[in-house]
C-alpha cells in the first residue's frame, strides 16, 4: 500500500539514512494514478469537495476523500501547498483517531506527502499532528505505522518540533516499531530515532525506554538488514552516560568486539568509534573491553584496516603499538 522508506543524509556521517520521498503505492499503475489525479482535481471546487468529504458521515466517502488527497499530494510540490492552504490538514489530523484502519492509513499517508513541502510542516504541527500521529504509530496497519514514523521524521527536521515529539511520548512506540515492525518499518523507526536523538533529552528518553537491547539485537544479527542503521543510532546514544551504561549492561561490548573481528569495514570503523567512546573516561570499561578480547582485532585494524580505520585506532584514545594499546586498556 502507500509506503515510504525514510532515512536521510542529515549529516555527512550518515549516508545510512536516505531522504524521505512520498509514498510508493502499489495500488495503482503510474498511468491509472495520473488518470485518478486528473479526475480528482480539475478545478478548485473539486479540492474543496474532497476536503468537505473528509467530514462526511459516510465512511466510504471519507475513505475516498482521504485517498484522493493522498494521491493529489503524492508528486506535486505546488499541489501540496495548495491542499494545505485550502484547509485539508485539520480534518486529516482529526481522522488519525479513526477506528477504521484503511481510513487512518490514507490520512497518515496524505499527511506524510503534505509534509514534504517545507511550508506545510508548521501547518501540520499546529493542527495537533505530533500527538495525533501516536495512534497510527502505536496501533495502525504496518503501512500506517511506518508512514507515521516518516511524518515524524519530516516534522523533527524543525528543532522545536523535535523537542515536542520527544515530549509527546513518541519514542517508546518508535522503539516498539524498531523491535517488532517489518523491515521497512524498522528502517523508518531507526531513521526517526536517529534524528530525534540528536537532542540530549531525547537520548535519555530513548535509553530509559529500553532502546539499547533491540539495537544490539539488530547489530548481532547479520541477516537483520539493519546493521549500519543500528550502529549509527548506538553511536549517538553513547555520547551520554546513560547510553554508555545501558550498552555495557546489555552486553554490548561483546557485540561490538565481534563486529571489529568479522564485520564489514564500515561497521568495524563505527564499532571502534563506539568502543572508544565508552572507554574514554572509564577504566572499568577498558578492562571489560580487554577481557572480551578486543586487543588483537584492534591491533590488526590499526595495521591492516582501511586508511580511515587505521586513523580511528591510531589517532584517538589508543596508541598505535600492541604493547601500548594493551597497557592503556588495562
Image (cartoon, rainbow, N blue to C red):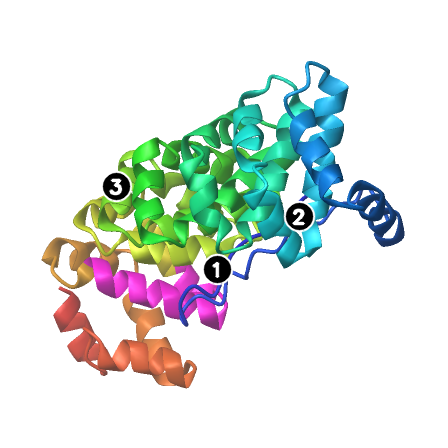
Decide if residue 89 is on the left or right side of residue 52.
left
**Residue located at (18% from left, 73% from top):** 317
Q: In this view, does 93 lie to the left or right of 109?
A: left
Q: Is mark 3 on a helix, strand or loop?
A: helix
Residue picked out by circle 1:
228
Give the residue at x 56% y 37%: 87
The disc at residue 142 is none
Name the secondary structure under disc 1: helix
Q: Distance between the residues labelled 1 and 3?
A: 22 Å
Magenta region, residue range: 258-278
**How many other residues sit within 10 Å of disc 3, few (<14), some (14-19) or many (≥20)?**
few
Residue 205, compared with residue 234, is above or below; it is above
Q: Mark 3 or mark 2, which has the lower sequence index?
A: 2
Q: Is residue 38 visible?
A: yes
Q: Position of residue 26 (x, y in %)?
A: 79, 45
Name which of mark 1 and mark 3 comes first in the sequence.
1
On whether residue 271 falls in the magenta region, the answer is yes
Q: Quadrant of the C terminus?
A: bottom left
List the residue tagged with mark 2.
73
Q: Which of marks 1 and 2 is in front?
A: 2
**Image x and y of residue 224, in percent:** 56, 49
Quadrant of the image containing the N terminus: top right
Left or right: 226, with 58 as reference point: left
Which tag is nearer the camera, tag 3 or tag 2? 2
Which one is earlier in the sequence, the residue at label 1 or at label 2?
2
The residue carrying pointer 1 sits among few (fewer than 14), some (14 to 19) or many (20 or more) residues within 10 Å by Cα, namely: some
Residue at numbered disc 3: 249
Q: In this view, does 19 lie above or below 4?
A: below
**Does 30 lie within the magenta span?**
no
Q: Which SS type dominates the magenta stretch? A: helix
The x and y percentages for residue 322 are: 23, 78
Amino acid at each position: 500500500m502507500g509506503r515510504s522508506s525514510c532515512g536521510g543524509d542529515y549529516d555527512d556521517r550518515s549516508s545510512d539514512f536516505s531522504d524521505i520521498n512520498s509514498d510508493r503505492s502499489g495500488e495503482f499503475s503510474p498511468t491509472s494514478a495520473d488518470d485518478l489525479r486528473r479526475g480528482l482535481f480539475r478545478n478548485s471546487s473539486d479540492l474543496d469537495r474532497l476536503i468537505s468529504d473528509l467530514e462526511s458521515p459516510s465512511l466510504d466517502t471519507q475513505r475516498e476523500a482521504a485517498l484522493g488527497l493522498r494521491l493529489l499530494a503524492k508528486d506535486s510540490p505546488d499541489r501540496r501547498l495548495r491542499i494545505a492552504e485550502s484547509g485539508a490538514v485539520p480534518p486529516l489530523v482529526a481522522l488519525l483517531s479513526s477506528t477504521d484502519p484503511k481510513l487512518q492509513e490514507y490520512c497518515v499517508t496524505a499527511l506524510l506527502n503534505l509534509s514534504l513541502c517545507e511550508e506545510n510542516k508548521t501547518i501540520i504541527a499546529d493542527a495537533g499532528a505530533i500527538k495525533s500521529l501516536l495512534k497510527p504509530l502505536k496501533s495502525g496497519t504496518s503501512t500506517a505505522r511506518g508512514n507515521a514514523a516518516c511524518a515524524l521524521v519530516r516534522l523533527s527536521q524543525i528543532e522545536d518540533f523535535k523537542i515536542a515529539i520527544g515530549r509527546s511520548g513518541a519514542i517508546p512506540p518508535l522503539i516498539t516499531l524498531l523491535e517488532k515492525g517489518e523491515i521497512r518499518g524498522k528502517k523508518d523507526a531507526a531513521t526517526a530515532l536517529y534524528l530525534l536523538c540528536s537532542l540530549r533529552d531525547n537520548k535519555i528518553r530513548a535509553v530509559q525506554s529500553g532502546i539499547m537491547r533491540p539495537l544490539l539485537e539488530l547489530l548481532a544479527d547479520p541477516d537483520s538488514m539493519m546493521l549500519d542503521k543500528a550502529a549509527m543510532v548506538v553511536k549517538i546514544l553513547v555520547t551520554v552516560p546513560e547510553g554508555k551504561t545501558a550498552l555495557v549492561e546489555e552486553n554490548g561490548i561483546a557485540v561490538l568486539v565481534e563486529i571489529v573481528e568479522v564485520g564489514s569495514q564500515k561497521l568495524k570503523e563505527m564499532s571502534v568509534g563506539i568502543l572508544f567512546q565508552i572507554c574514554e573516561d572509564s577504566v572499568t570499561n577498558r578492562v571489560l573491553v580487554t577481557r572480551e578480547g578486543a586487543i588483537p582485532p584492534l591491533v590488526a585494524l590499526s595495521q591492516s584496516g582501511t586508511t580511515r580505520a587505521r586513523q580511528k585506532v591510531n589517532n584517538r584514545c589508543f596508541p598505535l603499538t600492541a604493547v601500548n594499546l594493551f597497557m592503556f586498556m588495562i
